[in-house]
């Protein structure tokens, strides 16, 4: 659904179903408030402006079409440390080819956080922020397979 009568209605709707229901409440609110905009259309019942998603389904679909772009050819030239983080791989998505990406990176490291899903950083922002700091400071991150 691309429009709702209010931000609150969008938050309630998104928070009631996968994959968004696993998001931390503050992440869900930020996701909706940042990803929707007030529309010039008015709600038929209350006359208030409705809210519409900024990234339409058709635009999002183009992101998946572009997965075969040429940037993957250049991965062997990336010489800095790169952490590729994934959650559980239960649904088709980018996590399915993460191991292949890491294999192409000279200093790549796969970080698996199997207690998280598709939107890992939005599900447990405190945990992920600690993992990012650990990665960049060289300390051993917890709950990952290195």
Image (cartoon, rainbow, N blue to C red):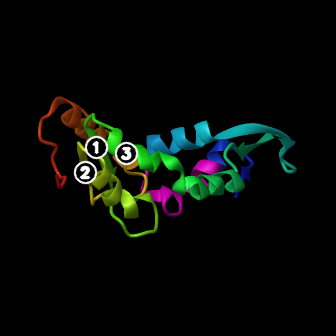
Is residue 75 placed above or below 22 in the rendered structure?
above
Main secondary structure found in the magenta portion: helix
For disc 3, the neighbor class at 10 Å (few under 14, some 14 to 19, many from 20) is some
* Residue 144 in the image, given as x and y percentages of width and height: 19, 52
Of badges 2 and 3, the one in the foreground is 3
For disc 2, the neighbor class at 10 Å (few under 14, some 14 to 19, many from 20) is many
Residue designated by label 3: 75
The range drawn in magenta is 10-23
The residue nearer to you, when weighing 101 against 135, is 101
The residue nearer to you, when weighing 136 against 133, is 136
First in sequence: mark 2 vs mark 3: 3
Give SS at disc 1: strand
Task: Name the residue located 15 percent from the left edge and 47 percent from the top edge.
Answer: 142
* Residue 101 in the image, given as x and y percentages of width and height: 35, 53
Residue designated by label 1: 83
Question: Relative to 1, is 132 on the left or the right?
Answer: left
Disc marking residue 27: none
Q: Quadrant of the N terminus?
A: bottom right
- Residues at marks 3 and 1 touching, judged by CB atoms closer than 8 Å: no
The residue nearer to you, when weighing 123 against 7, is 123
Distance CA(mark 3)–CA(mark 1): 13 Å
> Extreme left residue here?
140
- Residues at marks 1 and 2 touching, judged by CB atoms closer than 8 Å: yes
Question: Relative to 114, is 10 on the left or the right?
Answer: right
Q: Is residue 67 visible?
A: yes
- Residues at marks 2 and 3 touching, judged by CB atoms closer than 8 Å: no
Task: Name the residue located 25 percent from the left edge and 51 percent from the top edge.
Answer: 111
Question: Relative to 112, is 48 on the left or the right?
Answer: right
Residue designated by label 2: 111
């Amino acid at each position: 659904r691309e429009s709702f009568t209010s931000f609150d209605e969008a938050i309630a709707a998104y928070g009631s179903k996968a994959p968004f229901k696993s998001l931390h409440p503050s992440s869900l609110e930020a996701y909706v408030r940042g990803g929707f905009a007030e529309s010039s259309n008015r709600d038929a019942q209350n006359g208030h402006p409705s809210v519409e998603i900024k990234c339409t389904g058709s635009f999002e679909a183009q992101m998946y079409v572009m997965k075969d772009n040429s940037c993957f050819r250049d991965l062997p030239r990336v010489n800095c440390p790169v952490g590729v983080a994934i959650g559980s791989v239960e649904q088709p998505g980018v996590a399915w080819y993460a191991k292949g990406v890491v294999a192409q990176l000279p200093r790549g490291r796969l970080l698996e956080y199997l207690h998280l899903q598709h939107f890992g950083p939005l599900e447990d922002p405190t945990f992920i922020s600690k993992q990012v700091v650990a990665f960049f400071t060289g300390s051993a991150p917890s709950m990952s397979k290195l």
